[in-house]
Image (cartoon, rainbow, N blue to C red):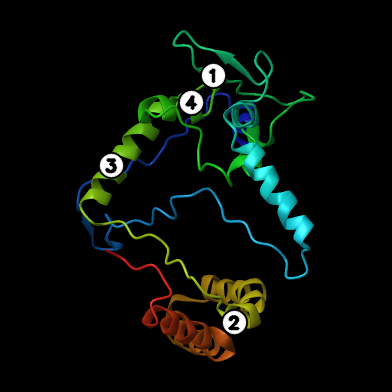
Amino acid sequence: MNVLNSFYEKNPDGDLGVIVCSGEFTYDETWGVSNSYRPNNVFGAMVGFANDATEDEMKAAMMYLEWLAQEENLFTMTWGLEGVNYTVGEDGNPVAVGDQSGLAEQQGHNNNVDYWMLVTASKSFGNVEQDVAAIAPQGLPEDFTQDILDNYYGQLALYNAGYANSDCLFAAAIDAVTEYGTSLKEEVYPQYRDELTMCSEEEFDALYDTLSQEYLDMGYQAVIDERLEKLNDGLTTRLQ
């Protein structure tokens, strides 16, 4: 919301839009098949504990989640305070206040999702059209509700047609990720990404091959091999 409010403040005549998934199989000469997409996981977040967490600390965290999952508490954490963070619409459902800047009770990103996503992935009334209307940005010069809803139905059509891939989830630790993941992701990848982005078109293919092999040698091949081992051992989810 802060980004959107700032955009319209500086661009009062600005025109933003949502790229809506058509739900149809398409092919583009440049991008190839464009109907497949990654819906990500169907939960808000996962929780983990440090290896030196005490039994009391883990118990306290679980007690907090049990408290948060109670209907009254979850409602307050997701919607905030009536008349401050939300109003009540004609249908009796809460309507989030669009711009909460300056409020002592301002919610994080206007919905506090980081606080409650361990219990639920999204606010929900049990009806997708009401849900989209509730979570769409409020109080802006443009209303994105219908575009977001159209995009949902387009993605749902692709999902039902089998063109959606969820992330693979592992039921065991990947030691190679622990050993190499941070350096590869935070140090090597940004450097190689920038080199490939800024090189000339004539250099790209050869440079890509060179950097790809270096990336594998620096630990990514070990990550791939261990992930495959877990897959073959039945310790991962699998695509349908």
Q: Which residue is drawn at 52% across and 88% down?
A: 222
Instruction: Name the side, left or right, on which 123 lies relative to 54.
Output: left
Q: Relative to 191, does residue 30 appear above or below in the rendering? A: above
Kind of residue sitting beneath label 2: Asp
Observer-nearest residue: 118 or 70?
Answer: 70
Where does the image place residue 25, in percent across and percent down from the top left?
Answer: 19, 53
Nearer the observer: mark 3 or 4; the answer is 4
Task: Say which residue label 2 marks.
Answer: 175
Kind of residue sitting beneath label 1: Val
- Which badge, 3 or 1, is on the more N-terminal residue? 1
Q: Distance between the residues labelled 2 and 4?
A: 41 Å
- Which badge, 1 or 2, is on the more N-terminal residue? 1
Task: Say which residue label 3 marks.
Answer: 154
Kind of residue sitting beneath label 4: Ala
Task: Say which residue label 4 marks.
Answer: 134
Q: How far apart are marks 4 and 1 (CA)?
A: 6 Å
Disc 1 packing (10 Å; few <14; some 14–19; many ≥20): some
- Which badge, 4 or 1, is on the more N-terminal residue? 1
Where does the image place residue 105, in percent across and percent down from the top left?
Answer: 75, 25
Q: How far apart are marks 3 and 1 (CA)?
A: 25 Å
Task: Say which residue label 1 marks.
Answer: 95
- Which badge, 3 or 4, is on the more N-terminal residue? 4
- Tell me which corner region of the image, top left, top right, bottom left or bottom right, holds residue 239: bottom left
